[in-house]
Amino acid sequence: MLALKKKLESEAKCLPNGIIGMSSFLNHQVDAPLLKEVGEEFARRFQAKLPTKILTAETSGLLPALSMAMVLGLPMIYARKQRPVTMVQEPYTAEAESHTKGGRIRLYVTPEFLLSTDRVVIIDDVLASAVTTLALVSIVKQSGAALVGIGAVIEKCYENGRQKLEPLNVPIESLAKVISVDNARLVLAD
Amino acid sequence: MLALKKKLESEAKCLPNGIIGMSSFLNHQVDAPLLKEVGEEFARRFQAKLPTKILTAETSGLLPALSMAMVLGLPMIYARKQRPVTMVQEPYTAEAESHTKGGRIRLYVTPEFLLSTDRVVIIDDVLASAVTTLALVSIVKQSGAALVGIGAVIEKCYENGRQKLEPLNVPIESLAKVISVDNARLVLAD
């Protein structure tokens, strides 16, 4: 995705510990026209897998997931990080961790929204160490639904998340690949 | 908005303490086509105010705010509930509280994204006691930007948030008004 690559080259900030600052367009201020393109691109890449639901996790995953779900006219589900009082039914749950915020978190999804007949694409903003993605994969497995694809807006190739997901044998699509953040410089794949 | 009213009548759950369960279409599973309509309706109602930015707060406010921002081609900003390590600059900040989760929270917005020349519409999923909205209003005031409107998908009229916002003298638009949840039954305004 050329527009995304240009955005990364012009606005992303290289911070310590391999963290990429994308708060001007992705996870604080949001470039809505860019997010619209992101949703269209995910829809194009995954529609042949005939998904019935898009699954993501709070918080910044909501944006690309909603955008894709709007294009395909599908329900989107976002796993909650806290179990709200409105979640009455015993939820599917799995543990994950936040790289930028530190510490472990737990994700919750209500069983009535994820059926064994569903075909699920997992979407997130960033694929890094894949811990959040694997927690979502665990929730999909608990539901008996079929996982049919995994998508991320940005892939941090240097954190090797893709290798952990390859055994799942589903398409893994990222719209921009960051190879390294050496010397405070972002190196993108072609 | 007829589609939203029908959704509330068919799927919303009346829970204790005036809480409305909307997890099947708004804040856990998300009805993406409905959210698309919500964004179009907000755009229609506020475009004459010539907004330059849409502001919301984590988490469920992101969905209607992004949808509206996509229609108008504007940047959307979501206030963070935790200050991430990527937020280097001293942020604008204000305190709010979560009705469904309990406890007080603090919202953060990076100054570089909210300029004194901006015209801001605040969007949220629910207008209840208006505590979150007032925190966002405080952040807009700190920035020197002009507040030009406030929108909510659902207004809980029985929590009187609108009265607290009226002194701001900006249009307040909600797409569905819940008058009461008496006897576990949702009563909507016409």
Image (spheres, coloured by chain):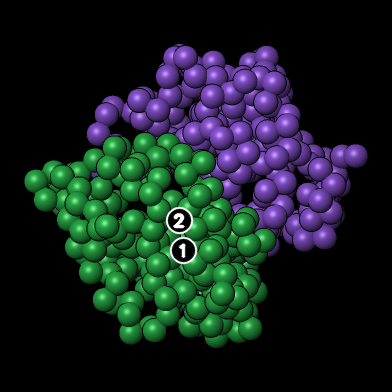
Chain colours: A green, B purple
Q: What percent of the width, then of the height, locates residue B12? A: 75, 57
Q: What percent of the width, then of the height, locates residue A121? A: 51, 71
Amino acid type, mark 1: Ile
Residue B68 location, quadrant: top right
Mark 1 lies on residue = A123
Mark 2 lies on residue = A61
Quadrant where the image shows the N terminus of chain B: top right
- The answer to whether the residues at label 1 and label 2 have Cβ atoms under 8 Å apart is yes
* Vertical relation: A93 (above or below) B15: below
Depth check: B21 or A142 in front? Answer: A142
Depth check: A2 or B67 in front? Answer: A2
Q: Secondary structure at mark 1?
A: strand
Q: Which residue is drawn at the image coordinates 50% and 61% (left, top)?
A: A42
Q: Secondary structure at mark 2?
A: loop
In which chain is the residue bearing label 2? A
Amino acid type, mark 2: Gly
Q: What percent of the width, then of the height, locates residue A83? A: 51, 62
* Vertical relation: A157 (above or below) A63: below
Whole-angstrom CA distance, mark 1 to mark 2, is 7 Å
